[in-house]
Image (cartoon, rainbow, N blue to C red):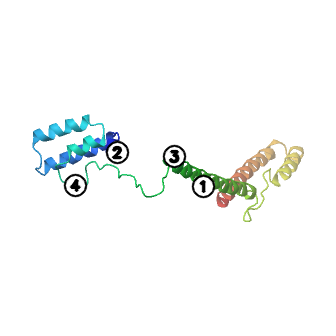
């Protein structure tokens, strides 16, 4: 089959119409000729039809250029075979990249809790809590509820200070 007998698509028609408009702007075509050729371009079905529409105009790189004829002397190359080989190589590259990403993720998960700069922090109540319990018991026995209020305010202040300190440590480790 000749390359000029291949069917064309909208992209080829658009390129030819753009070329015709350029020739019209340069004065090579009249308005009537432009309209006639645009109508023929829209009705064209094969590369031969488009080539006939622009045959008497100089080539400006905008118009339709039919695909080159296949080389008869070289080895016959099946396009399906080339496509399959290309897809096989692409799949191989994707699998290799996926394996590499998977290994990097696994390594990251293994080491994320054992970072050398991180120290293990105690996440429970500080050592002040048992001290506060002892003081509150002594205050209840010895001093009544006035001392208990002081101990409760001190405990609340210590908890707020401790939570602010822990948040600052977490931010510095990120």
Residue labelled with disc 2 = 2
Looking at the image, is mark 1 or mark 2 nearer the viewer? 2
Image coordinates of residue 82 in percent, x first then y, are 52, 51
Label 4 vs label 2, nearer the camera: 2
Closest to the observer: 120 or 4? 4
Tell me the SS state at disc 2.
loop
Residues under labels 1 and 2: Cα distance? 37 Å
Give the residue number, with chain letter if any, for mark 3.
80
Q: Determine the residue located farthest toward the front in the rendered image.
A: 73
Which mark is drawn over residue 93?
A: 1
Disc 1, SS: helix
User: For the residues carrying marks 3 and 1, which lies nearer the camera in this image?
Assistant: 3
Q: Residue at x 13, y 52 (%)?
A: 26
Earlier in the chain: of badge 4 and badge 3, it is 4
Q: Disc 4 to disc 1, how far (Cα)?
A: 40 Å
Q: Residues within 10 Å of mark 4 (few under 14, many from 20)?
A: few
Label 4: state its secondary structure.
loop
Which numbered dot is residue 60? 4
């Amino acid at each position: 089959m000749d390359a000029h007998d291949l069917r064309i698509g909208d992209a080829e028609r658009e390129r030819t119409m753009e070329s015709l408009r350029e020739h019209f702007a340069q004065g090579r075509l009249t308005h009537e000729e432009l309209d006639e050729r645009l109508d023929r371009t829209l009705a064209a079905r094969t590369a031969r039809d488009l080539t006939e529409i622009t045959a008497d105009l100089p080539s400006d790189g905008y118009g339709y250029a039919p695909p080159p004829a296949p080389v008869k002397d070289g080895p016959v190359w099946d396009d399906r075979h080339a496509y399959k080989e290309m897809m096989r190589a692409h799949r191989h590259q994707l699998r290799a990249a996926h394996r590499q990403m998977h290994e990097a993720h696994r390594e990251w998960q293994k080491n994320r809790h054992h970072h050398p700069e991180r120290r293990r922090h105690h996440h429970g109540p500080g050592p002040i809590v048992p001290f506060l319990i002892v003081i509150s018991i002594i205050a209840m026995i010895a001093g009544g509820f006035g001392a208990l209020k002081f101990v409760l305010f001190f405990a609340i202040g210590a908890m707020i200070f401790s939570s602010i300190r822990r948040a600052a440590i977490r931010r510095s480790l990120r």
